Image (cartoon, grey):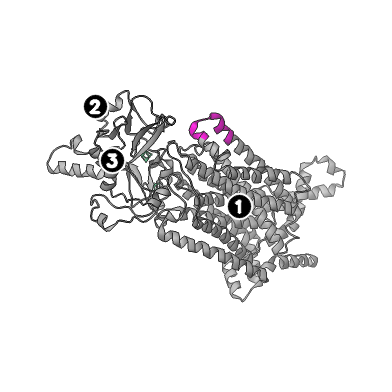
Amino acid sequence: MDKKSDDYSKVEEDLLRPITQTGRDFYVTVAILLAIISVGVFAWIIQLREGLGVTGLNRPVFWGVYITNFVFFIGISHAGTLISAILRLANAEWRRAITRSAEVITVLVLFIGVGNIINDLGRPERLLYTIFHGEFLSPLLWDVVSISAYLFCSTVYLYLPLIPDIALMRDKFKGTTRGKIYRILAIGWKGTEKQWKILGRAISLMAVMIIPIAVSVHTVVSYVFAMTIQPMWHSTILGPYFVTGAIFSGIAGLLIAMVIIRKSCHLQAYLKPVHFNNLGLLLLVMSLLWFYFTFTETLTSFYGAEPSHLAVFYAKLTGQYAPYFWTMIFLCFIFPVAILSNRKTRTISGVFIVSCGVIVGMWLERYTIVLPTLINPRLPIERGAYTPTWVELAITAACFAAFILLYILFVKVFPIVSIWEIKEGKEVGVEETAERVKSYLPDTIFEKKSEGIGANEINSSSKRENDHE
Amino acid sequence: MRKWGMVIDLDRCTGCQACVVACKAENNVVFSDPTQEETHRAISWMSVLTVLEGEYPDVKEKYFPRPCMHCENPPCVKVCPVGATYKNPEGIVAQVYTRCIGCRYCTNNCPYTLKYFNYSRPRWSNEMKNLLNPDVSRRQVGVVEKCSFCHHRLQKAKEDARFEKRELREEDYVPACVQTCPTGALIFGDLENPKSEVHRLSKISRAFRLLEELGTEPQVFYLTEGEWHG
Ligand code: SF4
Ligand code: SF4
């Protein structure tokens, strides 16, 4: 018993260190991020005063970088909650150290995504008209509904597993102002058996609920394009294609965050090579799936050879957007497959570099979906061109900076690796996994041993089931 | 119920742009400066597009006036999240400037790319300010606008008819572009009325509609001899 609590004090010390100790690097990073954000805010104020004329948008290119950002950030949001929910439901033990860092991404990035679409409105002050005068025939309204649902559920899903850790910190920081805030947030958590039971149930319920919502979110985002009648937007494949791309970029985002957390918070003992290996494999699978969709989508429009589709097709593959398109193919398919399919290069730094590439590549993917269609409208006499201005770029940079800043602040306030789940992993997980493996095998192998152990096993496994319910 | 529509005889159009000017003056469309033209942000509800045919030196220039098609099945209306653009019972696709949130979804779903967005605050010279049409509201920055078939003229004609205690006659309502066209290339009327000129013309063999294969069913018909090469 003593030995155990010793282990945990080390765990707690390690995982609370980012909260208790703040180095110089932290302030430097925050200062840089704040500088980038303030340039973005300055650009945004100009845009609010002058109207969207300060962007590079025109007619017929009515959408540009902001919509790209919107789709991109909503895509990244799939990192978290979806992956963490799937891993939780699949009882993947290696999830324990990574779920929280994934869930935080979701919540933060959703705000950034929504911010981008509001920023794209000609009259942002009329935003609430979508509620007062909402027309349900419009896919944009489907977006409003499903993104709000996702934002709500993923916030709850982030918060629930935080409660026991918040309670822990409430006890640690007793008497300080910080402690008072933790006390409010801990909503009276005492860790009684009943509370654990309720919490476990709530988490499982949210995990089940969040998966269809997450899938619907990106499907509906794709519908914004797919429901129009514009060439290469109007495609049935776009829903699953967007969801795949979203999970793909989400995993990449998560990996980048994990590498940085591991290094800056000295969590090498918690975020181990095996985590990066497993997520790296997942990234590889998504890369192949993503390429499959890209290939199908592109080939179909080429083979069909409808002039309006071909115009978009050539704009992507050989025309103005070819550099972006082929960079995307390299970063999202060729490079990841080359690096990730080899065990020797699937190291932490290998995975990190690939992930950075995927993030850039997936942003370009969104860009090459939005723009080539817009510069090639159906009436052949109209042709468009688009170059983003510094305002759009500054606001985009500020979005990334804001996301990173909020993430860092979260790490400063809450443990980024779930303390109780790590403990639970040792107390329950190890045994449970052994049991589970046993249950996969023919019982006869174990019968050779004495009867006593067999009986024990049955008892403990039925007990485990009780625990879970 | 009436269904207002237009017939445009391409073989009569001389490309004089009178309709374009008339439309701008009638509907308080802001005058664009050269930078707006360069950045493709000029607003012109009615525009005369030119289509070049053939190779130099044997080229032919065709003129092609293009208002909103007032589709019977308008893709722009479906996608508006706040109902700021709608099809009224008389077939006119209308735009509510005070409702529009400026998301530009409708502009992207119009296959004829003829909705316009106010990228900057409208600026009027002092001389112009006195000439603005009081019947048409001015648009703010950040909203979408487009050809309304001079809907305010229909309202006025209806009021007049009511005042004179008679039915609205078809010829009471004519959009500014149609009224101005010196060659009679633009013809306007009720497509539902079997006796009307537009009804007759819309059925003749020279008639066609733009991007007919999309099923948007434009209420603007074009007439031309032979093929049209867009
Ligand atoms: S032409 Fe375009 S703007 Fe006019 S009704 Fe049809 S879709 Fe709408
Ligand atoms: S730009 Fe205005 S009219 Fe067009 S879809 Fe958006 S809100 Fe509706």
Magenta span has A408?
no
Label drawn at residue B194: 2
Which portion, as a residue range, is magenta?
Answer: A298-310
> Going by the image, does A439 lie left or right of A362?
right
Q: Please, what is the three-letter code of the amino acid marked with disc 3?
A: Cys
Please tell me how crowded label 1 is: few (under 14), some (14-19), or many (20+) other residues with Cα within 10 Å.
many
The residue singled out by tag 3 in the image is B19
> Going by the image, does B183 lie left or right of A239?
left
> Going by the image, does B185 lie left or right of A201?
left
Please tell me how crowded label 3 is: few (under 14), some (14-19), or many (20+) other residues with Cα within 10 Å.
many
Out of A178 and B112, give the one closest to the viewer: B112
Out of A169 and A380, give the one closest to the viewer: A380
C-alpha separation, residue under disc 2 versus residue under disc 3: 27 Å
Residue depicted at 36% across the width and 56% down the height: B121
Q: How many marks?
A: 3
The residue singled out by tag 1 in the image is A81
Q: Please, what is the three-letter code of the amino acid marked with disc 2?
A: Pro
C-alpha separation, residue under disc 1 versus residue under disc 2: 61 Å
Out of B70 and A132, give the one closest to the viewer: B70
Q: Is residue B60 above or below residue A352?
A: above
Query: In this orientation, does residue A462 appear?
Result: yes
Residue depicted at 24% across the width and 45% down the height: B152
Magenta span has A305?
yes
In the picture, which quadrant includes the N terminus of chain A?
A: bottom right
Residue depicted at 65% across the width and 46% down the height: A331
Q: Residue furthest top?
A: B205
Q: Please, what is the three-letter code of the amino acid marked with disc 1?
A: Thr
Q: Are marks 1 and 2 on the same chain?
A: no
- Mark 3 chain: B
Q: Secondary structure at mark 3?
A: helix
